Image (tube, coloured by chain):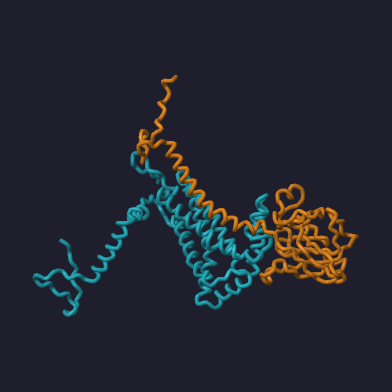
Chain colours: A cyan, B orange
Amino acid sequence: MTMKLPLPPLPSALQPKPKRPGESERVRPVDQAKEAGIATIDWIDERTSLSGALRWTMFRKVPKGTNWFYTLGSATLFAFLSQAVTGVFLAMYYDPSPTRAYESARHITNEVFLGEFVRGMHKWGSTVMVVLIFLHMGRVFFFGAYKYPRELSWITGSVLLILTMTMSFTGYLLPFDQRSYWATIVGVNINGTGPLVGPFLSDFLRGGSEFGATTLSRFYAIHMLLVPGGIIALIGFHLYLVARLGTTAPPWLRASSDTGHLEERV
Amino acid sequence: MADGRKEPQSKYTLDRGMPGAFEGETVTRRRLMNLTAQGAGAVAVAAFALPALGFAAGSAIFERPVVDWQRIGVPDDFPTETYVPRVITETPGIGTVGKTTIYVRRRNDAIDPPPNPPGYDEQIIALSTRCMHLGCPVRYVEASQRFICPCHGGVYNLLGQVDGGPPVRPLDRFYTRIRNGQVEVGPRYSVNSEFRRFPSYRDPAQDLDGIGQYLYPGRFSTPKQ
């Protein structure tokens, strides 16, 4: 028998009326909505069987000693999502032509409603993302989480780091002020120092032998289409590996012995 | 030893219990069908991927820019002992971004080395302001008769040779000619530390002495001359 809390002292008009004999339970709209929601999800699940995959991803066993350091990867993912969302909306106002780019960036900052804020989020968010990636990498390194069987997570993570750096480099040109322009000149020339292929890679990046009419739109396409696609795909694979292999216990936890007794030093 | 050998496997997929096997199908036949299907897929992917890649890289790497000669004044505008700045358009159609400053003077046989290789005899020396470290703009400082780069401290002497700092070769130059009494500036070319001319100009930071000239090949888009 379940205990019932006494009803609050409501005026009699608001108190639920007792059921009359023979009257069936009234269907409340809340219940109807709940029923409809369940029916919809069931309809999808019957056709996709996604619930199993979802359960497999979400309800994983987590080792003892899991702590706040384990959230750095999710934090990086969140930073990426923030970059993606703000970036998509910045693209609505930005114009990647050499004569219009600076003006459109200025327009975003000074005239568009919340433009300064969203552009600021994108600008500072990129720094945050790079910082978080390195913290995440440091966590994985110092916890030894790159070891067997998680080598592939480390490798994809390293590629993700390189892609993030590519994003930072290509995004740096887009405001098209003096700093962006010269930083890109210097960056492309550093790239050109690679023996044999370097000069051709530089020409590919610039779209010619000089910083020209298509350099900016090239960087823009790389920044918002090419690299983000790669990053999204690799994040998916990276997360799959996390779900597949699980996370590691922190190194200061000793593995429990075969006898099941936990050894402890006091 | 024949006993130790394994019985050769049947060539029929049915006998081997392969999934989806049907009577009469051989392994070779299945392999042929597999390769055909995968090959068709590869051809389809190549049919869009290769043109797309060529589209992205082709004109960037192979296209020859138009040779454009720009008038910058008459020969008497330019002294022999110091430089006069001029602004030319390096890339047309993109506004201020496509412009660049050059430093110009008349050839001075007392200090200028003979042309190397001979053949192109320039009366007007036009130096690029592109620093040969990483491409920042250098400026000519009259008092010290040096070109100085603001980024990482590259210093060049009056001839454009490296005097200090990280640059790897002398400042680039531009072809010049005198037509109808007017000085005209043409395409850029690079020189190494012995003032040997490289018509296909290299990007900054690409060494042109010794092995450098082979490590950093010229562009396909510039004629060898």
When the figure is inspected, residue B52 is found, relative to residue A106, above or below; the finding is above
- Left-right relation of A19 to B118: left
| Image position, residue B103 (x, y; %) | 79, 66
The foreground one among B56 and A109 is B56
| Image position, residue A150 (x, y; %) | 46, 46
| Image position, residue B188 (x, y; %) | 76, 61
The foreground one among A71 and B157 is B157
| Image position, residue A143 (x, y; %) | 47, 49
- Left-right relation of B67 to B34: right
- Left-right relation of B212 to A107: right
Tell me if residue B166 can be seen. Answer: no
- Residue at the far right: name it: B110
The foreground one among A176 and B54 is B54
The foreground one among A92 and A56 is A92
- Residue at the far left: name it: A21
Q: Residue at x 47, y 66 (%)?
A: A85
Marks counted in the figure total: 0
- Left-right relation of A19 to A101: left
Tell me if residue B130 can be seen. Answer: yes
When the figure is inspected, residue A120 is found, relative to residue B45, above or below; the finding is below
In the rendered image, which quarter contains the N terminus of chain A? bottom left
Q: Residue at x 79, y 66 (%)?
A: B185
Would you identify the image quadrant in which residue B171 lies?
bottom right
Q: Residue at x 84, y 58 (%)?
A: B120
- Residue at the far front: name it: B24
